[in-house]
Amino acid sequence: MLQNGGVASQDGAIKDTTTQAFVKDVIEESRRQPVLVDFWAPWCGPCKQLTPILEKVVRAAKGKVRLVKMNIDEHPQIPGQMGIQSIPAVIAFQNGQPVDGFMGALPESQVTAFIERLTRDRIGGEEKDLLKAADAALVEGDPAGAAEIYAQVLAQDASNVHALAGLARCYVETGAMEQAKQTLALVPEAKRDEAPVAAARAALELAEQAASLGPLVELEQKVAANPLDHQARFDLALALNANGRRVEAADQLIEIVRRDRKWNDDGARKQLVQFFEAWGPTDEASVAGRRRLSSILFA
C-alpha cells in the first residue's frame, strides 16, 4: 500500500521504499531504467499536491521511468546522507547515480518536461541499438528476426520511420508484398522521402519487377546466346537481384552501360541507381558497383 495519498500501481511503476530496500529499489533498478525518488513527509502540504501529479506522469510514461517514494520521517538516513533539507524533493537516478532533480510542487507540464528530458537520450539510445541490430539481421538474411526487432521499436514508437521502412523490407524479403505496401502507407506523408523509406519503396518496386520475369536460367541463356540483347541482360540483372546475387546484378547493368550507355534512355544506369538506393549506401555491392560505374562514366 502506498502511503503518500497514492494508489499502488499494478505494474510496479510506483512503490514505497525503506532505508533497507533503497539499494534494491533505486540503485539497482536505475541500472535498468530511470528511477525518480520522491522524498516526502505526511505533514508536507506541497507534497500532497505533487504526488498525484508525479504518479499521473509516471503512469503516462508507460514503463520508461519508475517512481519510488520515501517518507523522510520514517526513513531519515538516506535523505540525510543526500543533504535533502527541504521537501518535496525529487531526485532522478540512472545507472546507480543521482543525475537530476527538482524541489517544490511543480505543475504537471513541468514534471512531464522533466521526465521527457530524463528519458529522451536513454530511449533514443535503446532505439538506435535495436534498429542497428534489426538492420544487421536483415542484411544477414534473417528477415523474420529483423521483423521481430523492428516490431519491438514500433511497440514503443508506432511512427518510427526507420522501423516502419525496415519492417516493410522484411515483408518484401519474404514475398509479402501487400503487407509491405500497407506498412509503407503508415509512414506520415511528410516523411515519405526519407532515405529508409525510399530504400524500402525501391526494394518493393524491384521485387514487383522481378516477379514478372522469366526463369533465371532462361535469361542467362538468352544473354549467352546474344551478348548484345540488352533487354535480356537488363531482365537478368533484375532476376539476379531478386535472388540475392547483388554483385552479379550490378555487373550486368554495368556491362550494358559499358556497351551502350544511351540504351533505353540511360536505363541501365538509372536501374543501377535504384539498386544502390534499395541496397543502402554502405552495402558492399553498392560500394563496389559505384566504384565500377564511376570508372566507366569518368574514364
Image: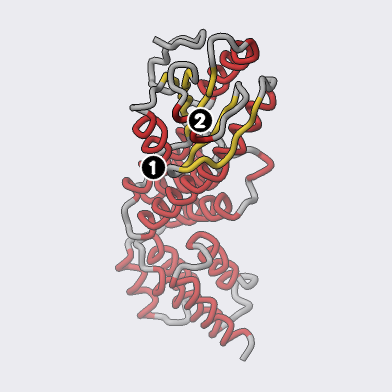
Identity of the amino acid at label 2? Answer: Gly
When the figure is inspected, residue 215 is found, relative to residue 189, above or below; the finding is below
Q: Give residue 111's mark.
A: none
Q: Is 210 in front, or is 164?
A: 164
Question: For the residue labelled by badge 2, is the local secondary structure a helix, a strand or a loop?
Answer: helix
Identity of the amino acid at label 1? Answer: Ala
Residue 159 rendering spot, x and y as whole percentages? 56, 36
Q: Nearer the viewer, mark 2 or mark 1?
A: 2
Query: Which residue does the image show at 52% across and 79% down from the upper left?
Result: 256
When the figure is inspected, residue 24 is found, relative to residue 236, above or below; the finding is above
Residue 183 rendering spot, x and y as whole percentages? 50, 38
Residue 104 falls in image quadrant: top right
Q: Give residue 80's mark.
A: 2
Residue 261 rendering spot, x and y as whole percentages? 60, 80
Residue placed under numbered mark 1 in the picture: 176
Q: Is 230 in front, or is 31?
A: 31
Q: Is 239 in front, or is 193?
A: 193
Residue 274 falls in image quadrant: bottom right
Query: Which residue does the image show at 60% across and 34% down from the upper left?
Result: 101
**Label 1 Cα neighbours within 10 Å, binned few <14 / some 14-19 / many ≥20:** some
Residue 268 rendering spot, x and y as whole percentages? 55, 72
Between the C-alphas of marks 2 and 1, the distance is 61 Å
Query: Which residue does the image show at 42% across and 71% down from the upper left?
Result: 249
